[in-house]
C-alpha cells in the first residue's frame, strides 16, 4: 500500500525549513549512514544529525506526523525511528536498493519521504518504488509525503538540474502484518467517509467497535 499525504507542512513551514537548511556546512556525505553495499549505489548529502538546525527540522517532521490522522490510520505507529534530511544535487542519485529490516533496533515496517522542495525546481530525482503493477515514480509538491512498505525495492532517479531536499524515515507499526494494516486502514477510511456523509451514529459506532477489537487481536503492544 502506497499512500500520499498532502500538506503535512504548509507553505510557511516549507519556506522556513528551506531557509534553515541553506547552510552547506550542515551536510555531509550520505555514505555516513549507508551500509557497505549501499555506498556503491548512493550519491547524496545528508544533514549532520549533530547540527541543531537539522535536529530541529527532523523533530518538527516527527511532531506533524504524530498528529496527522491519515498517517496514524495508515501506519498505526508504535514508534517513528530515525529521520534523515537528504540533499541531492546535479549528478546525484540512489540506485535501486532495499531498506534494512532493522535500523537502530527498530523494525522497519514502513518508510516515508517528505518532499521539501517544489518539483519544478529540479529535474529528475523521482522516488521510484517497485510495486506488483510495476515501478511507480513519485515526485510530490513541497510539504507532501509518501508512505510505503519498507520491503519494496526503490531508488532515487538521477538529478540533472537543481536541488532536491527531502526528509526520509522509518516506522515500526503496532501491526506487523501489512495485510492486517491494510484492512484496518480500509475500516478507518470507510468510517471517515460515513461520518462525512452524515450516516447514522449506530453504524459508525459498530465499525469503530469492530476496528478496536481487531486492533486488540492483532496489536503487538
Image (spheres, rainbow, N blue to C red):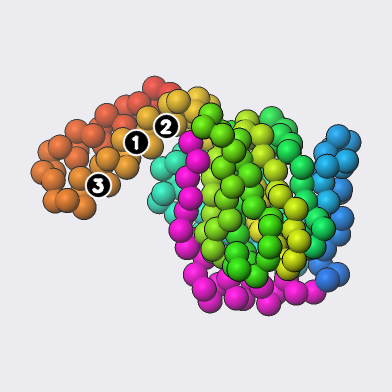
Q: Is residue 150 left or right of residue 42?
A: left
User: How far apart are the alpha carbons under marks 2 and 1?
Assistant: 6 Å
Q: Earlier in the sequence, mark 3 or mark 1?
A: 1
Q: Quadrant of residue 162?
A: bottom right
Q: Note whether residue 110 is visible.
A: no
Residue on which the image places disc 3 = 193
Using residue 113 as the reference point, say whether residue 33 is left or right of it. right
Label 2 environment density (alpha carbons within 10 Å; few <14, some 14–19, many ≥20):
some
Disc 2 is placed on an element classified as helix
Percent position of residue 151, x then y: 63, 31
Separation (CA) of disc 3 from disc 2: 16 Å
In percent of width and height, residue 154 lies at 67, 39
Q: Residue at x 34, y 36 (%)?
A: 186
Left or right: residue 217 compared with residue 134: left
What residue would you read off at disc 1?
186
Q: Residue at x 15, y 37 (%)?
A: 203
Badge 3 density bin: few <14, some 14–19, many ≥20, Cα 10 Å:
few
Residue occupying the point 53% across, 29% down: 132
Residue at numbered disc 2: 182
Element under disc 3:
helix
Magenta stretch: includes residue 213:
no
User: Reading the chain from its start, which is encountered first: label 3 or label 2?
Assistant: 2
Q: Are marks 2 and 1 in contact (CB under 8 Å)?
A: yes
Give the class, few, some or many, for how many residues have Cα within 10 Å of label 1's Cα (few <14, many ≥20). some
| Magenta span | 1-23
- Depth order, front residue of 35/162: 162
Q: Is residue 128 above or below residue 143?
A: above
Q: Secondary structure at mark 1?
A: helix
Image spot of residue 204 (x, y percent): 19, 40
In the image, 81 versus 21, the foreground residue is: 21
Amino acid at each position: 500500500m502506497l499512500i500520499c499525504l498532502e500538506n503535512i507542512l504548509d507553505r510557511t513551514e516549507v519556506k522556513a525549513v528551506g531557509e534553515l537548511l541553506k547552510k552547506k556546512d550542515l551536510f555531509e556525505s550520505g555514505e555516513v549512514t549507508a551500509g557497505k553495499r549501499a555506498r556503491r549505489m548512493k550519491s547524496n548529502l545528508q544533514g549532520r544529525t549533530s547540527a541543531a538546525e537539522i535536529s530541529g527540522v527532523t523533530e518538527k517532521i516527527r511532531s506533524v506526523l504524530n498528529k496527522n490522522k491519515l498517517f496514524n490510520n495508515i501506519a498505526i505507529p508504535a514508534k517513528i525511528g530515525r529521520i534523515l534530511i537528504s540533499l541531492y544535487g546535479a549528478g546525484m542519485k540512489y540506485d535501486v536498493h532495499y531498506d534494512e529490516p532493522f535500523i537502530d533496533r527498530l523494525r522497519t515496517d514502513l518508510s516515508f519521504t517528505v518532499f521539501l522542495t517544489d518539483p519544478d525546481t529540479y529535474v529528475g530525482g523521482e522516488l521510484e518504488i517497485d510495486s506488483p503493477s510495476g515501478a511507480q515514480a513519485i515526485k510530490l509538491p513541497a510539504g507532501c509525503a509518501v508512505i510505503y512498505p519498507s520491503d519494496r525495492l526503490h531508488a532515487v532517479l538521477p538529478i540533472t538540474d537543481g536541488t532536491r531536499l527531502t526528509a526520509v524515515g522509518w516506522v515500526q507499526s503496532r501491526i506487523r502484518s501489512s495485510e492486517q494494516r491494510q484492512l484496518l486502514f480500509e475500516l478507518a477510511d470507510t468510517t471517515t467517509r460515513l461520518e462525512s456523509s452524515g450516516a447514522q451514529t449506530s453504524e459508525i459506532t459498530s465499525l469503530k467497535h469492530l476496528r478496536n477489537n481487531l486492533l486488540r487481536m492483532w496489536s503487538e503492544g
